[in-house]
Amino acid sequence: MNHAIPDAMLDFIDVGEGPSARRIAVRSRRGQGPEQGPEQGPGLVWLGGFKSDMQGSKAVALDEWARDRGRAVVRFDYSGHGESGGDFADGTIGSWLEDSVAVFDRFCDGPQVLIGSSMGGWMALLLAREIKKRQEKQQAKASLAGLVLIAPAPDFTEELMWKNFPAAVKKEIETKGVWLRPSDYGDGSPYPITRKLIEEGRNHLVLGSAIDLGCPVRILQGAQDPDVPWQHAFALTHRLPADDVVLTMIQDGDHRLSRPQDIARILAAVAEIG
C-alpha cells in the first residue's frame, strides 16, 4: 500500500435553492498518475442505495481499491442520507438525481465509470443519460467509460414498491401522504415511503424503452435477492443494446452483495472497464 496517497477529502457542496437547498457530503480523491489520467484508467463514481451511505462496505472497498491503483474516486451521500443535510422524507428520485449531477459536475474530469448499487443502479442509468446528452452537445468535461450495476433497481418506486403494495398500504400513502415501511437493514427502524417519492418517481422510469448509453455495462445480481428479484435485472438487460452488456448471476448472492467474494467480483467488473 502506498501511504503517500492521501485519504479521500471530505467536502460539502450546496445543491438546490430556497426551501429545497441542502448540503451534500462528498469524499473524493484525485488520480495519482503523471497526467492524473488514462494510464491509471477512468475515474470511479460510487452511487449508493436507498437509505444507505458512502461508508458502506462496498463503497469503502472501492475507495481502497482505487487508492491502491492511483485511480480518481468520488463517493457521496444523497440528501437525507449519511452525512448530507436534508430530510430523508423530502427526497425524491429527481432530487437525488440533482445531487448526483451536481457532484459529478464538480468533482469529475475525463472518462468515468459509474458504479451504482440498488437504487444507485437507477441513478447511474439516469446520470449516464444526462452525461451522454451533454457529450452529444459537446458540453461535457467528463465522459462515460462504462457502468457497473450491483443488484440494480431501476423504476423500483413503481415496479417493486407501488405495484406490490397491498391496497391498505396504497390507501395510507394516498390519504396520509406517507407509510412507514418496516426495515431489515440499518438499525431496523421503519422508514417513510412518501406519496411524493412514488409520484415523482414516475417522471424517471427507464424500463419502458431502450436505454442507449453507448458504453460497456456490467451487472451483478444475486439470485437469492429478496428486494430486487433477478427477473428485474433480466428486464434491464433487455432494455440495453447488446453490444457490451454482461449480466453475472451470483447463485447464492443476496441483495447486499457485500461478502468478500462479492466485493472481489464487483472490483473485477470495475477493472474490466477502460
Image: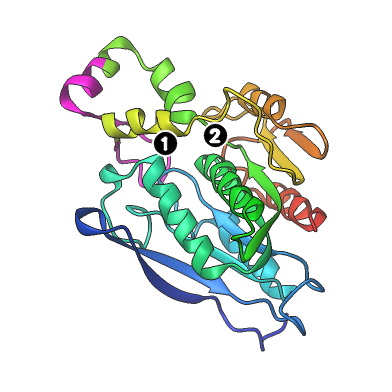
Q: Quadrant of residue 4?
A: bottom right
Give the vertical position of 44 relative to 181 (above or below): below
State the residue position of label 1. 184
Secondary structure, mark 2, is loop
The answer to whether 175 appears left or right of 88 in the picture is: left
Q: Nearer the viewer, residue 214 or 5?
A: 214
Question: Which residues, given as a range, are shown in magenta?
Answer: 171-192
Q: In the rendered structure, does residue 127 fall within the stretch colored magenta?
A: no
Q: Residues within 10 Å of mark 1 (few under 14, many from 20)?
A: few
Q: Position of residue 263 (x, y in %)?
A: 68, 52
**Location of residue 158 in the rendering, given as x and y in whole percent from the top left corner:** 44, 24
Could you tell me residue 14's position as x and y percent? 34, 66
User: Do the residues under discs 1 and 2 have CB atoms within 8 angstroms?
Assistant: no
What number is the disc on residue 153? Answer: 2
Q: In the picture, which quadrant includes the N terminus? A: bottom right
Observer-nearest of 76 and 39: 39
Q: Is residue 137 left or right of residue 87?
A: right
In the foreground, 137 or 115: 137
The image position of residue 250, as x and y in percent, is 73, 35
Give the farthest residue toward the bottom. 4
Residue positioned most to the front: 137
On the rendered image, what quadrant is the C terminus found in? bottom right
When the figure is inspected, residue 150 is found, relative to residue 112, above or below; the finding is: above
Q: Residue flagged by tag 2: what amino acid is it?
A: Ala
